[in-house]
Structures are given as structure tokens and as C-alpha cells.
Amino acid sequence: MLTKTIVRKVVNSTIRPASHMAVLSRREIEQLRDVTGTGLHKLFRKCALAVLSSGSQVDSCEELMSMYPDFDIQVSERHQGIVLEVNNAPAGAFVDDQLIEGIRYHLFSILRDILYLRDITSNHKNISPNLQISHEIFYRLRHAGAFHPGVKPNTVVCWGGHAIPVEEYDYTKEIGYYLGLRGIDICTGCGAGAMKGPMKGAAIAHAKQRHKSGRHIGLTEPGIIAAEAPNAIVNELIVMPDIEKRLEAFIRLGHVLIIFPGGVGTMEELLFVLGVLSHPENKDIELPIFLTGPASSGPYFDSVIRFIEMTLGATSLNLIRKVIGDPELIAKLVNDALLHVTRERRQRDDSFHYNWSLHLDEAFQEPFLPDHESMAKLQLSRDLPTQVLAANLRRALSGIVSGNVKEQGINAIREHGPFQITGEPELMQAMDELLTSFAQQGRMKVQGDYIPCYEIVTDSTA
Amino acid sequence: MLTKTIVRKVVNSTIRPASHMAVLSRREIEQLRDVTGTGLHKLFRKCALAVLSSGSQVDSCEELMSMYPDFDIQVSERHQGIVLEVNNAPAGAFVDDQLIEGIRYHLFSILRDILYLRDITSNHKNISPNLQISHEIFYRLRHAGAFHPGVKPNTVVCWGGHAIPVEEYDYTKEIGYYLGLRGIDICTGCGAGAMKGPMKGAAIAHAKQRHKSGRHIGLTEPGIIAAEAPNAIVNELIVMPDIEKRLEAFIRLGHVLIIFPGGVGTMEELLFVLGVLSHPENKDIELPIFLTGPASSGPYFDSVIRFIEMTLGATSLNLIRKVIGDPELIAKLVNDALLHVTRERRQRDDSFHYNWSLHLDEAFQEPFLPDHESMAKLQLSRDLPTQVLAANLRRALSGIVSGNVKEQGINAIREHGPFQITGEPELMQAMDELLTSFAQQGRMKVQGDYIPCYEIVTDSTA
Amino acid sequence: MLTKTIVRKVVNSTIRPASHMAVLSRREIEQLRDVTGTGLHKLFRKCALAVLSSGSQVDSCEELMSMYPDFDIQVSERHQGIVLEVNNAPAGAFVDDQLIEGIRYHLFSILRDILYLRDITSNHKNISPNLQISHEIFYRLRHAGAFHPGVKPNTVVCWGGHAIPVEEYDYTKEIGYYLGLRGIDICTGCGAGAMKGPMKGAAIAHAKQRHKSGRHIGLTEPGIIAAEAPNAIVNELIVMPDIEKRLEAFIRLGHVLIIFPGGVGTMEELLFVLGVLSHPENKDIELPIFLTGPASSGPYFDSVIRFIEMTLGATSLNLIRKVIGDPELIAKLVNDALLHVTRERRQRDDSFHYNWSLHLDEAFQEPFLPDHESMAKLQLSRDLPTQVLAANLRRALSGIVSGNVKEQGINAIREHGPFQITGEPELMQAMDELLTSFAQQGRMKVQGDYIPCYEIVTDSTA
Amino acid sequence: MLTKTIVRKVVNSTIRPASHMAVLSRREIEQLRDVTGTGLHKLFRKCALAVLSSGSQVDSCEELMSMYPDFDIQVSERHQGIVLEVNNAPAGAFVDDQLIEGIRYHLFSILRDILYLRDITSNHKNISPNLQISHEIFYRLRHAGAFHPGVKPNTVVCWGGHAIPVEEYDYTKEIGYYLGLRGIDICTGCGAGAMKGPMKGAAIAHAKQRHKSGRHIGLTEPGIIAAEAPNAIVNELIVMPDIEKRLEAFIRLGHVLIIFPGGVGTMEELLFVLGVLSHPENKDIELPIFLTGPASSGPYFDSVIRFIEMTLGATSLNLIRKVIGDPELIAKLVNDALLHVTRERRQRDDSFHYNWSLHLDEAFQEPFLPDHESMAKLQLSRDLPTQVLAANLRRALSGIVSGNVKEQGINAIREHGPFQITGEPELMQAMDELLTSFAQQGRMKVQGDYIPCYEIVTDSTA
């Protein structure tokens, strides 16, 4: 029997730095070369490959690594600074053997953030742990140059699926276009679909508005970067250490949220922000949330809203506003909402660039490592305070996302079978309904038949 | 019977200048206000309305004027420079009552060029008339800031129809994308379709390449600006006085030509450049021409090539290269062609920014006013030198374009019936075939049934 | 007898353009090369040599030409634009064979303005001659990029001698320093002394204020450029065609005037502006004038003020304010004065960048060619309206400056002896006193004994 | 008896940040406000006062503090970032109540570096202590934005006295002028005299060369900042934690050294660099050193050279080159030297921006706290390796500088009497001669009679 060999086009290249990020100490270079055994080189290589594969339809680092087994990237010192030597890199990142500039920025952004992943050690011993994490996120964002003080609230976070029907994708482009005409900056979680569409639309609008400094911020994490590689329009790429810090970064950096149709991951994000906003300390915080999609996405949003109503209760619906099929209206509403946020920040004398006032419990900050044990232990009952229930539902979904798209989760499921989730019957039924409707709408996984990575075990003792 | 009144949304606004173009003398302001009776105000108003209607589907200034009868634009002096006061302007040019920035640039570009339309008087009495015109074009382009000396040949002129099928439009976007990835500048005749697509594609590519200074040059003329209003992505708008100077500007400013599917106007442009290049003095000039479109445009290019072969002869086909359905290949070929042009300019010590070496006979420069008399007089015979025949065929088609989309032409046809064109039977048959195939392919007019604005009178005496 | 040969250090160099000024037409290049016999090359060569001799102590073009007889400058076309080929240029303009950047700008500014000297032809046939000249000046300044619309009145014109004692020079530097600390732009007539000091002081202040766009405008004319070559700190050099247009440019472009100690030339400038402001139509125009110098300059200003009082009358003294020995106070007064000017321009809706409201009689605009005939004809009587008398006194002094430092004047005196000036005895006595005091103070000529170039012929018939 | 009360002019002001340095975390703001008791506020206040007193003739923080006892500076958070509130600040830092921009930069540079003073904690446990310090210096310089990778070696460090005769000061200006004409960047230790002159000269040259990005780097430390406050031309101010790190920063950042006449401090710096270069590992390192001054400084350099010869030996003289009275020659030699350094760095593939190859023993890095004990303990014998002897001589002089100008040293002398220094008789005699000649030349202290802060105790046991 013959094995079919796919010969992928690869490129070797020497890449000069995109900016001042290139000034590394000799020690840092050694770390990235793994002379020091810190493991940074492995991480850098993995993330770099993800970035260089931008635009491909691959869903995991494992898969990527197996496609480009000979890929390597090394940092070298030169008299004018450093250079990156890449070998056997995916050819799609290059135009006539020149690396696409946007991807070059991404490579050096990753390098910047990966080195900093280890470096940060809070000097603030006498503050509470949750404040410490919020400070850490602040330092990471500042290190990445994400703060533009003096600029009025202008950043819209867009959440939604990376694999959505073309009609929904076109709708996100239209939203981006109308936001872009208004000079609004876009922040997403990187990747394709609802994360790429708004940036593409905004890029066209920015060209019409001669707007040369529009921000297209991509917030990612090492665990997700392969499945949702930054599209090349992202002009600020930031790597946060884990999903919880990434989610907190979204809501502290962003001023308004737009939620497009998506899958479990999007639902997880919505639960996160609803949970945070449900905390009594946050009751006066302005963080407007819009749910929007084309007419065809009606059933999706119906499922989502029903789920929230059944789990967190009808009050939580006051935190969101749904608009179907009107991109220009959304853009106008977002514009108004930004004015509200601006006014509120002024009143509090709170900074425009980082939402310090937002209170986050540790439940939203502690990394949740979804494994069979932690998933089985989750408390899911409507007797819990809303923010606690939201946090736990979020974790449950996080586990499901992990089982679907993250390396670790996929491996765990392969080995031990589906996660077992227990909880109050009504809640579990709501979740079951939600996930079933997602599966029916084809929102659970990109390729092949959908096989759930979890089983719901109704808590008969409740 | 009730007359249906369409209430169009209009906007009043005060518009500050886009740049230093705003420094006008008191006299210039008076001219634009028509205190001096120069007629400049009428011209300015007409062109301004066209620019403000960018994106609409209107085909003539007449129609526009009737849609916005109360539109006016006035220049006023302020202590900080000038401002434009617009009244009853089409709302589509505004976002939340703010003029789209790209359109603001267009308004002031028009103002700049219209004032200069009258100002230029050649001081070079002792040079030949055709050189004088070439100098005039040089001065106009320089006045408009179109020269970037020291930049290597990088400007690709795209010609093609402004009303083309979506498949062809998407193809022009793809070409723009692959050119944009290579940092190539685009120059078109303004308008929609093949003139907009490449710029839109390039805008996305520029975003990926972090290319902030890509040029999207639109070359227009007062007679065509309403039918082919500049799309807002055009970031350099230049108004030339007439079609002949506009065509000369294209081939002196551009370094490579791409011809997409179009109609009679596109054919006219192709004849113009083939005629010029056929002149013996130009035999060593590098001005590469590519014909390209999606697979579905095959029949179109077959008609075009057959027509050239039958009229100018097979030799002329050596000047062009046809590539169907491969946008990335075109981009690579264009890149190579630009290197050739660069090398040739260096060898001649000819400037990169203006193709002085190109020789143009007066036949290609004299404004051709297509009316029933001039159309009837055209000599069309293969006994003429190639460049003369090409010039005359171009004029014939120019008349046809005028009859289709230009105010003056449409009015003349309305009054006196179709133009009568006489010529050598084989030539006239070729033209008849060409135009019939265009009509069959739906390439002759945007809306309603196509009614030819000409009749071919075979020259029985030939 | 042996002739002493001075071997001057010279440099040959190819100079690339400083900016877009470099885009010339083939015809313009021919004009500058004198293929066309326009005489432009001779003028360009003369002015270029003056600019390249910046810092030398030479007083006339003749002298310069005799020092560098083999100097030449030629424009050549290259594929990337034009270059200047200089041969046998004064070595002082170069640092290690690289032309000083500021001087490179000057060369190309001269080229820009010299080409435009011929080009301008007013299209405004139906306006009065004096308005026409004011428009011409506007067009020249605009062509030179001298207008920065939207910038508040900020330009201080400094007049004073180019050969002044070191104490006075240091004082002008201090004034420049205190003006520069306030971000005020400086405009002078080029040259050394009071024209260079304020710029040098301002340059230090700008460094302290991180002010990178401070303007150091030098207004010159072909007749004076050799004697008062622009110092290299001048970052905007503008060549006006003659002294009258240059003086008008000063008072239409500048917002406040500072008059330092000087000689006859400075007195001429003061008479010009006092004459203009004395016109009834200008009685409400704000154009504040400060006379200032160190304590040692007291006698100088006493002479000046006595002369004005005796000729134009005490009322004219209201137009000026004298401050001795307090640079910081002057800077504060200038700052206040600029606020007044700003307010007045706003009220009139007059442009900030060009003082259109100022009325100039033709007497202040007509080029005055001082020769023995015109000098003899001057009417000098206190019966004339103030502005007419001021104009004539100015002309008389202009003739004297010409006889002192300008090529033509010096030659005329050499040939025909001193000018003969006639007038009302009291006036002539005032002038005699003024010039005698200037001579005593060493303000009449730089080197050698001072020999007056005029004789006062008291008008016994008056 | 009446106490004379001096009323100093003070200003209250709110100061907006100069740049992105303004993004502080809430915790950092608290630290600077001393809510946290870190002591940062006291340090910030002291350094801020020094910066705001730039240009005054004060020699210690103590003195400054007593002059402005009510001065305070506080950081406040605003919605657009932070602001500084200053109260009772020296009026000399302001122009019409606006803080001089250069000083504003200095305030925020201090804030940046002071916060970072505490933050840095090396993660590099497994490298040698001296390498660790070199890395720390690298991180501090990088944090301050001092690295411009890709720029060829271009930084000249100027050392010399801050209180020197006017003739020497003018000479340093001239050197700065000729360096500035060549686009060379200047780095000094801040302060007046030889630290200010080169920058002032360069500022004028930069204006002539239209050089807008010339670097004027000032390297200071908290202990010296009051006595040598940065002049406002410094456009990059960097605060290092102590004198040793500051000196190391000089020689790792600079490419060529110029040593002007100075006092003991300058001698200390020269000993430091000669000691480092004497280390066998550094024998191939290019770090050219020029000694230069006007003709009148001849005796000074004679003393210096004799001292080096008598202590470190004649070989050390090969490391330096003396040029007297020829500023343009120095500029040319420096230019050549920079080319050598560039070539050497390329050959080693060593970075242009940080001289990693230079080896420093801990003896040159350990903070030396000069007190009576440490001064008494110093080993001073020619039997020691050259680099060790140089280090110890440097320490001895460091103690003397401290006793002269630093707060701590002055207090210690006040309390315990002069330092006692022991050593080999010939060495001690050399030092005695050196210091005596300095005192005779008036180079030991600015005001009042010079009273040595040390006594030499000849080591009779040696």
C-alpha cells in the first residue's frame, strides 16, 4: 500500500524586526533559542507556526505541527538588532517570498508577549489577589502598547463564531463597514468568521475615510492561537496567558460589546460578561452589549435568549439588546453607547483606556482547567447568586469548547470519553436544549459529523 | 393623476478644507462664486454634485441636476482659510451629517483643478503644438501633486467597464488584491465596476501589508464625472480638461496597463494606446498591456482581439497579452513588467514619473467633438497608417460613448437621430460585429433596452 | 611685480533635490540650462553662488563672481527626477564634501522661485493695478508654500542691520530666544546680523521647547541676495522679484514687526511701513511695530525717532513703540500684540495668513529704479500727504542703499559720481543729520572708510 | 537682628503627560503618592525639583529643598490618563506660566525611571553577577527607549566639568557645532558647562542641517541630579540608580568618548574607562577616547596625562588621543573613529546599540559608598593589575567628588572631618599633585575658597 505524500509549499526566510520590539538582550535571545531550557522556544515555535498559517482551515496546533514537521524559527543577533530565521514555513504567508507585513508584525508581537509571559511578577504584595490579576492584565496590555490615553472610548469588542454561514459573515462585514465609517476601532479574538468580517468591512470604510490609524486589535492566547490564527488585518496582536485573562482583557479594554452568531465559545463569552455585570458592585457600570445578526440568525438568538432567561433569569436580559438585520442602526446605537460610556468615565474620573471600576470576583479570574474531574465537580444550581451560576455555566461551556477545539481537551476526550456534567435538572435541560439547537444549526464543529464531547448527568439528588 | 414626489434626503453642511489646497486668493474665491461671470461656479457646482453623488447609479449630470435642483456649493473666506458651504447635498455622502473624508478630498481636488483649468497658459511659444500639449498635461499633473519623483515605476492603469457582471467585478477585486499585496499603485478613470474593484481589493491587501501610502488615482474630466463619479477609495482625484488629455495622462503617468472587460469606452481606450504605440517613433517604448478577466469573459476578449486583428492587423496583437482567469499570475506578470519598465527608463535616463519619450501625434491630442458632422467625416480605411486608422476608429467609438453616456452626445442624438459613420466595408463590418457582440453581451448600456446611437453607412465608393 | 594668487577651496558635487520642487518639465530644464536663451541660467547661477557663499563677508555679486570665476551650476534630468551639478563651488557650504542641508533647501528654493519669476501672468485684467500686484505677491508666496492656513497669527518680522556691533547682535539673539520660547516664528530679510541673530536664539529655544516646526522665513530678492545671503538656519527661503514686492510681502505675511538697530536699509523699511500705515484707509489695521536694542543702541533710536518726528511728524510716532534693553519684555509685548492681531482678523473675517485688508498705493509698489535721474526728481516736502512723503523718503534711502550695497547702484556711482538729492531744506537737514549720525555710529558701510554715495542739494527754490 | 527673607517666584500648574509614559496603573499612582509608604514620592519630589530648577546655580538637593520648602508634586488620575499637579515650583521652568516642553519631558522621564527603579528584578539567576548587572543596565536603557537598533554607531559621550571658564565652554559649543554638522548624537551626564555646550552647538548645527531627530542624551542618577540638573536641550533623560551603573551605561551606549577639561569628577570618569579598557579581555575593543580643549586648557591636560603616566603607566596613554584647539579636526577624527567602531561591531556581529563585548569586572560595578571607612580601606599600589588600580583610584576620586558636591558626602565631611586616604607614596604624591594643580586652576569647586575634603596619608609601611 502506498502512503499519499502531500508536498506542501514552504519557504525559508530571514525576517527583520517590525519595530523596536527587536531590541532583545543576549539572555532573552538565549531563552528563545532554548539554550536555557525554559521551554520558551517550543511555545514560540508553536505560536509562530499558527500565525504563519493564518488563513488556513486548520483547527489545532497538533494538526499544524504534523503538516509542517520541519518548521523552525530561530532568533539571531545581528549588529543592527535581531532577525528571525524561519525554515520550512507555510508559503501562504509570503508574497513572492516576502513575508506579508501584517504577519511580520504578528510574529514580533508574539515574541514580545511570550518573553513577557514569564517576566511579570507583581510587586504589589499587599493588595487582594483579584486586584493583583487585574493589575497584571493592565501591565500586559500596557507592555503591548494597547493603551492610547487621551483617546475617547472607541473600542468595540466583537464576539462570534469563526465558522459561520456566508450570510452571517457578510453581515459582520457590513457592521464593520458602518462602524469603520464612524472611525470606531474593532477588537476581536482573532481568527476567521465573525472575528475577521468586521475588520474587513472596517478596512474598506477606513480607506474611504482616509483613516490611517484605525485599530484592529486581536486578543489571543497560546491555547487558541492555532485554531483561531489572527487574520492579517489585525494590526495589534496581543497574547494573553490564558482564557480568563483574555476575557477580562476584553471587557476592561473594550467599551461596547457586539455579539454575533457563534457557537459554544461565543456563549461562553456572553456568560462571562453577564456574570461579571450581575455582580452587585457593577450595577452602575456602563458596558453596553448588542446581539446582532442577519434575519437568518433569528433562531440562533432565540435559543441564546431562552437559555439566559431559563438560567440567569429575565433580569439578565436587561443587560443586552438584540437588533436583527440592520447594520447601520447597530452602528448608530454603538456610537450613542460610546458617548454614554465616555460620559460615565468622565463622571467617575475613571480612565478611558482601562475599565478599573469593573469588579471581578476570583471565580472569573482563576484559570479553569477543564478535565474530567473539574467538569464533574461544577455546581450548577439556580440557588447560587447569579454571578456565581454564570461563572459555573461559563466553565461548563469552556470545558466543552476545550473538548471541541483545544489540543488538551481533545486529547482528554480521546482518552477518557466524554465529560460528565451534573446539575439542577432544569438547568441541565436548558443546556441540553441550547447545545442541541446549536448542533442542529451546525454551530458546534466545523468539519465532519458533530459528536458531543460531554454527557449531561441530571442531578437526581437535587 | 397624481405626480409622485420623491423626497430625497439632503444635507446642509460647512466643509473645512482637506489640505493646503484651501489657500485661495480673494479673486479666485470671487471666480468660484461667479461674481466675475467666468462660469466657473456652474462647472464647480456640477462636478461637486457628481462627487457628492458617488455610489449612486445615475448616468448623467442632467439627471443628477434634476434630482437635486436646490443643490448649491459656495466658497467663503474665513480667517483661518476658506470653507465650502453646501446646501441640499445628497445625504449619501455623509455619515451622521459628517462628510465622508474621501469625498471631502474629492471636493477640494475638483476645486483645485477647476481653478487651474483656466490658469494654464503655456509660455513655450517656440515648441511644437503636440509637445506643448504634453507639457500642459505635465503641468496639470504636477499641479495636482501626481508626481512622486524617486519612486520606481509602480503605477498600473486599469481600464474596463463601469457596469459589469458581478463575476467580472469580483475578478477585478481579486486582481486589485494581488496587486495590492505587491504594493502596486492603481490608476483608473473613476467610477464603479472595473474602476472600483481593483481599488477595493487593493485596500484590503494594503491593510494586510500595513501599506498606508498606496495610491488610488482617479483621472476624470468634467464631461464624464457625473456618469463615472469617483468612488470614495480614490485618494488622488485629478480632473483633466477633456478626454484626449485624460487619455494622454493615463499613458504618460501609468507604467503598465490592465484592460478588463468593458464596453465601447474601454475599446476606445485600447484603440488609443494601440494607435500611439503603433507610431514608428514609439517602437522601443515599454508600455506593457494585459487583457484579463474571469473565464466567463472569454467571448468578450475574443471579440476584441478579432476586431483588432481585422482593423489594425495581426502585428498589433504583439502589443497585448491576454490572460484569462488567473489573478495571481497577472499580478506576477505586472510585477515583472514594472521591472522591465524601470530598466528601460534608467537606460534612457527618462523620468520614472512621466513618460516623456512617448511620441503622440496631434491626431491623438486634438479634442474630438463628436457631432453628426465630425462623425460623418471620419476616414476609416486600412490604407491609412496604423496609427492614423487607430486614431480614427478611436474617434468613432468616442462618438458612440458620447452618444451613450455624455450629456452633449445624448442631447445631439435626441435631436438629430443616430450618427452616420462611413468607411471601408470590411472595417465597418468589423465594427458592426464588435458592437453587436457587445450589445449581445449586455455591455452597451446599463438600463433599459439598448438602442444604438449610430448607423453604419458602408462606403460603397471605396 | 608679482600678482598674489588666492587659491580658494572649491568643491564639485551632484546635488539631489530637497523635495518635490524637483519635478521639472523638460522645457524648464532647458530654460535653466539656457538652451532657450531666456537668461534664467545666468540669474540662477548668480543666486546659487550667493546661497553657497552663505557666511562669507562679501558684499556684492560682482565680488563673489570674481572670487569664484569658474563656478557653474547645471540642472540635469535623471530617471528619478532632476539633480544639480555644481562645479567649483565655495567649500564653506559643504561638510566633508556633503552640502549643508539648509543650503540645499535654499538652492532648490531659488530654483523654484526663479522659474516662477517668469511664469506668473495675472489673469485678473479687470482689477486695479495695485490690487493686481497684491495678488501677484499672494500667488508667489503661495507658490513658495508660505501660507499655513489655520495657524494663528504668529509671524514676527525682524528688520535691522546685517553688520552690527557684537553687543547688538547678542541682543537680537536674546530676543530670538525669548520669542522662540513662545513658539513664535521669525521672518527676516536673510543675511547676517539682525537677520541671523533672532533665528539663532530661536533655534536654541525651539530645542528646549521640542518645537520642530518653527519657521525661519527669509525673504530676499535677486538684487540683494549676494550681499545678504541667507544664513543656513533660514528654513523657508523665498525670492521676490524686487525690493517693493519684498517689502509688501513682509507686511502682508508678518503680524508684528521688530526693528533692531541697522543702517539706511533698515530706515528705508521703517519708512515704507510707516508710509503704508499712514494711509487713511489703514487707520484701523493692527500692525504693531517695536523698536528695540541693547542700552548701547539708545543714540541710534534717538536719531531714528527724531528723524521721523521731523519728517512725518509726531503723529507717526504713535505707530511705534520703543523698548530698550529688555528682551523678555519685548517677547511678552509681542505675544500680546499677536493676540490683538488675531482678534482683529477674526472680527474682519480676514485671513490669518495674508493681510488682504492692508491698502497699498502704487507709490509703494512701483519698482523704483534708483539712478541719477530718478533720484534727482524725487519730491521731498512736508506739504505732501504723509504717506506720499514717506514713500519718497523711502525711495531716497533706497537709492542710497543701492549706492552702498547693490551691484547696479555701485556701478552707477562709480561712473557718474554721487546722487544729487533735492528737497525742502528742513527735510534735507533731517536726512543729513540722520545719515551723519549713522556714519558716526559706523552704520553706513562694513569695510573701509565710509564715502557717502549721495550729495544733498538743498532746494533753494522751495 | 533681621532675617532676610528671599521671596522666590513660584508657579502652580497642572501638567499633562508628554507621551505614552503617562499610562500608570492605580497602584503605581499610589506609590508615587506615597499611600503605600514606598518612599517613592520623596525621591520623585526631589528629582522633580532638580529638573524644574534647571539653569539655576545650585549645587545640592539640600540647598534646593531649602529654597523651595513648599514645593510639591502629585500624580493624579484623570479619564484621559494622568496629570502632574505641581505647587510652588521654581518659576524659571515656565514661560508665561507654561512649563518649558523640554522640562516637561524630563519630569515624565524621571517618573518613568523612578517607578522602574524598584521594578526590575533579574530573572536570570544562573548567570554571573557582573553579567547580571550589565543585563540590568540593558533593561533600564531599553525601558527608557535609548536603543535605536539599525542606526549606525553615532553616539559621542562628552565628559567634562560643569563649571568651566567661558573660553572652555565656548570651545565645547564649537565641538558640538562641528559634530552636529555631521549628524552625530551627543550623550553627556547632564548639567551645565561641558555637558551643555556640545548640545547647544549641536542644536545650531542641526538647525542648519534640518536634522530634526538629533539625540541629546542625558544620563543622570538621583544623587547627582540636583547638582547637575539636565539642561532643557537634553531630549532624552535617563536616570540610572547609581554612579557605577551610570558610568557603565555611558561606555556601553556610547561609541566614542570626548573628554573636555573638568575637575575631579571628570578624572574619575577617565579612570573608570581606562581601567575597563585595561582589562585583558577588552584589548581588542574599539572605544576611541579624545582629550580636547582650547589652547588655554593645555596645563590641565598636561596634569591629567602626567597623572595617568605616573599611576597606570605609559601604556595606558595609548588608549587616548589629545588634540588641543582644533574643533573641526576633532569632529573629523570622531567621524573616522565612528567608522572604525561600525566596522568592528559588524565583524563581531555585536549590536550597534549596546556594547555587549565590553567586559566589566565587579570592581567597576559594585556601588562604592564613599565614607570614612571605605575611603580609608582603599588599596592604592602599582603592584596591583592596572584595571584594579584604576578602579581604586576611581573610587578615591569618587569619594572626593562626593565630599565636594553630593549631599551625603558633604554631610559626612561636615561631621567627621576630611577623608583619610592611604597608599603607595609615589601614587599619593601623583594624586596630591593632580588635585593641587586642579585647585590652582580653580577646578575643584564652584564657589568660595576651595577646602579639600580629604587628607593624603602616605603609607609608610609600604
Image (cartoon, coloured by chain):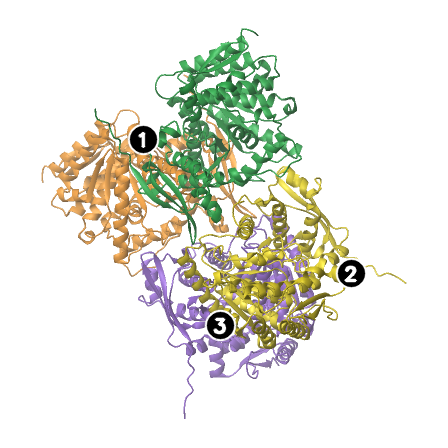
Chain colours: A purple, B yellow, C green, D orange
Distance from the alpha carbon under mark 2 to that under mark 3: 48 Å
Q: Is residue D426 above or below residue B106?
A: above
B29, B350: nearer the viewer: B350
Distance from the alpha carbon under mark 1 to that under mark 2: 87 Å
**Residue placed at 59% from the left, 19% from the top?**
C388
Determine the secondary structure under disc 3.
helix
**Residue placed at 51% from the left, 19% from the top?**
C373
Q: Report the residue marked by disc 3.
A: B329
Q: Position of residue B34 (x, y in %)?
A: 71, 42
Q: Residue furthest front?
A: B461
Determine the secondary structure under disc 2.
helix
Q: Position of residue A444 (x, y in %)?
A: 58, 78
Q: Position of residue C111 (x, y in %)?
A: 46, 41
Q: Report the residue marked by disc 1.
A: D170
Q: Report the residue marked by disc 2.
A: B415
Chain designation of label 1:
D
Inspect this view and state whether residue D218 appears: no
Residue B338: mark: none
C30, D414: nearer the viewer: C30
* Amino acid marked by disc 3: Leu
* Amino acid marked by disc 1: Asp
Q: Is residue B250 above or below residue C241?
A: below
Q: Is residue D324 left or right of residue B307?
A: left
D200, A364: nearer the viewer: D200
Please count the marks in the image. 3
Q: Position of residue A145 (x, y in %)?
A: 48, 55
Q: Earlier in the sequence, mark 2 or mark 3?
A: 3
